[in-house]
Amino acid sequence: MVTLAIAAILVTAGVPCFQHYLMRQHVTAAINQLHHDLMLARSEAVYRNAIVIACPGAPESGCAIGPDWSGGWIVFEDTDGDRALSADETVIRYGQLMQTVEVQTTSGRGPLRFFPDGSAPGTNMSISLCGHGGPRDARKLVISNIGRIRRDTWPDLDAARCPA
């Protein structure tokens, strides 16, 4: 009986911690995937000597309007320069996240364009990845005008973007 009581106490205390651990792992996996796909877009722009677009959306519907990347994103070579996925343009990468992570841009910037020199002209762009654990579990990618992609964690992240 004592062994069962101790086991029940340990399980009761351990389950919330394990759930929090899993949420952090989901956010970590999501930021790794998005970071990898944005780096792929930049390197493909240099390799192909062309403009490559990364935007929220799907291969069937093209780029979505708005700051929400939670439904997925596409990376494609913009051969006609219209910043939209056309029928003759092929998708280089289609990324999707788990439903437990919310992804929002913090700028009003549209599709992210990488030029043949690796730059991403325009304003700096931030993409926030929020789990259900609030701002302490949140992560952020910041894309500069020169195309550098860096990661930030909670102290640098606007807590209003990822409420607890």
Image (cartoon, rainbow, N blue to C red):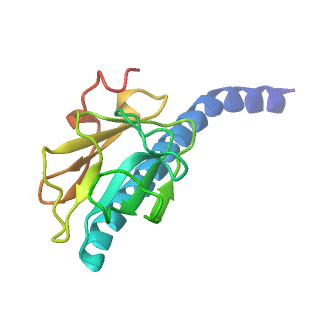
Residue 117 in view: yes
Q: Give 94 or 32, whichever is nearer the viewer.
A: 94
Kindly give the residue lying farthest to the right in the view shown.
1
Residue 53 pos. (x, y %) = 32, 57
16 with respect to 47 (left or right) = right
- Total marks shown come to 0
Q: Residue shown at 41%/20% (left/top)?
A: 164
Residue 21 pos. (x, y %) = 53, 40
Residue 24 pos. (x, y %) = 48, 41
Residue 127 pos. (x, y %) = 30, 41
Residue 36 in view: no
Q: Residue shown at 35%/29% (left/top)?
A: 135
Q: Is residue 139 above or below residue 108?
A: below
Q: Give 80 or 63, whichever is nearer the viewer.
A: 80
Q: Give 116 or 140, whichever is nearer the viewer.
A: 116
Query: Quadrant of residue 80 in the image?
Result: bottom left
Q: Is residue 89 above or below residue 130?
A: below
Q: Quadrant of the N terminus?
A: top right
